[in-house]
Image (spheres, rainbow, N blue to C red):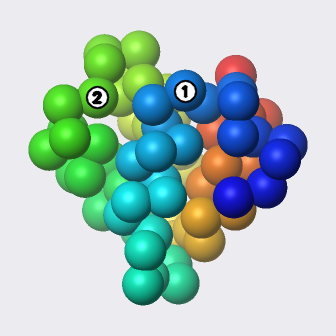
Amino acid sequence: MGDAHETANGPIDALLDSIFAGQERLSRADIYQHAVAADLPADALVRLDQLPEGEYTVDEAGEALTARR
């Protein structure tokens, strides 16, 4: 992932790296479902729930989450 968001998202970074392995794009719903299954902290789930609907690359997801901080 890009340097701009690596330290800004805490546990979300590890999740994104893991779920995007071998995937080019994932929907917001897919990202959120993986986060719930990974038992991310509540504050991380709230941030992920604020992602607009659509599909994201790993970099787009990270940038969108950083912009919403």
* Number of numbered callouts drawn: 2
In the rendered image, the residue lying farthest to the right is 4
In the rendered image, the residue lying farthest to the left is 37
- Tell me what residue is drawn at x 45 percent, y 31 percent: 11
Q: Is residue 24 above or below residue 53?
A: below
Q: Nearer the viewer, residue 32 or 39?
A: 39
Q: Residues within 10 Å of mark 2 (few under 14, many from 20)?
A: some
- Tell me what residue is drawn at x 70 percent, y 27 percent: 8
- Residue 39 pos. (x, y %): 18, 31
Q: Is residue 24 above or below residue 56?
A: below
Q: Is residue 22 visible?
A: yes
Which numbered marker is on residue 43?
Answer: none
The kind of residue on which mark 2 rests is Leu
What is the distance, in whole Å, between disc 2 and disc 1 at their CAs? 10 Å
Q: Is residue 54 above or below residue 68?
A: below
- Residue 5 pos. (x, y %): 75, 40
The quadrant holding residue 69 is top right
- Residue 29 pos. (x, y %): 32, 57
- Tell me what residue is drawn at x 52 percent, y 71 percent: 55
- Residue 52 pos. (x, y %): 55, 50
**Side (left or right) of 37 relative to 55:** left
SS for dot 2: loop
Q: Residues within 10 Å of mark 1 (few under 14, many from 20)?
A: few
| Circle 1 residue | 10
Which numbered marker is on residue 40?
Answer: 2
Q: Is residue 68 visible?
A: no
What is the quadrant of the N terminus in the image? bottom right
**Side (left or right) of 60 relative to 4:** left
- Tell me what residue is drawn at x 43 percent, y 74 percent: 21
Q: Tell me which numbered mark, 2 or 1, is placed earlier along the sequence.
A: 1
The kind of residue on which mark 1 rests is Gly
SS for dot 1: loop
